[in-house]
Amino acid sequence: MSRWLIATMTSVLFIALVVAVSGFEALLADVEPITQPDATPYLGPAMVVSVAIVVFLATAAGAREGNPGVTGLVAAATSYLVMLGVGAVGYALLRGDATELLVFPAGSALGPFVVGTVVVALVCVVGGIAVVRHQARATGAASEGSGSGPGPVSGGPGRTSAPAPDARGSDGGPR
């Protein structure tokens, strides 16, 4: 599969896991994802979608090269900043108060919704990169192993692409 397809699937998985984790946090700890009572119901989903874009880009970029753990940590830090930034801008625009650009992130920085989302982003990015790398190794080993070694392999040096003779006669029965 292409790295873009795996990055897309990783982003969709990320959104599903954030919904599940946030639901369990709200159920078990009796906390709201967005604690501001006058926030629009679209603020939380906007924050999650912005982090999903970070997860998509980090998975696609990290699939080519680099350490998956480092890429995951960079994606987690970026997710944290982007999530707080989108939330701060959205809430400041909603309230019409520029001081919310500092107050919203200060109040939400260590909240369970933000921390849980960042942890899920880290796990998804590292997992998505691991899947891409595993598939690359598996297809690389399969393509390397197909043209080397003993045995009748068609398409090798000095060999033809003709099919091997069949042990049956022309009528399909035994010879």
Image (cartoon, rainbow, N blue to C red):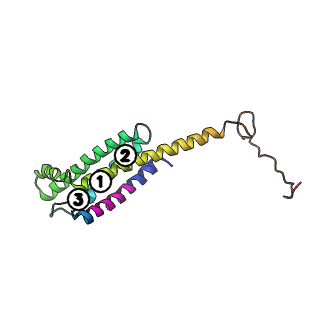
Horizontal side of residue 5 vs 16, given as left or right: right
| Residue sitting nearer the eye, 123 or 80 | 123
Q: For the view shown, which residue lies furthest in the right direction?
A: 175
First in sequence: mark 2 vs mark 1: 2
Q: Pinpoint residue 168: horizontal percent, then vertical percent.
A: 84, 54
Q: Residue at x 40, y 38 (%)?
A: 67
Rendered location of residue 76, percent (x, y): 30, 46
Query: Which of the two labelled residues, at mark 3 and mark 2, occupies the earlier sequence position?
Result: 3
Q: Which residue is mark 2?
A: 57
What residue is shown with label 1? 117
Q: Which mark is residue 43?
A: 3
The main secondary structure of the magenta stretch is: helix
Q: Amino acid at mark 1?
A: Thr
Q: Amino acid at mark 3?
A: Leu
Q: Residues within 10 Å of mark 3 (few under 14, many from 20)?
A: some
Residue at horizontal 32%, vertical 44%?
A: 75
Left or right: 134 with respect to 56?
Answer: right
Give the residues drawn in magenta, as a range. 13-25
* Amino acid bearing label 2: Leu
| Whole-percent x, y for residue 59 in the image | 39, 46
Instruction: Give the distance between the C-alpha atoms of the residues marked 2 and 1, in whole angstroms.
Output: 16 Å
Q: Secondary structure at mark 3?
A: helix
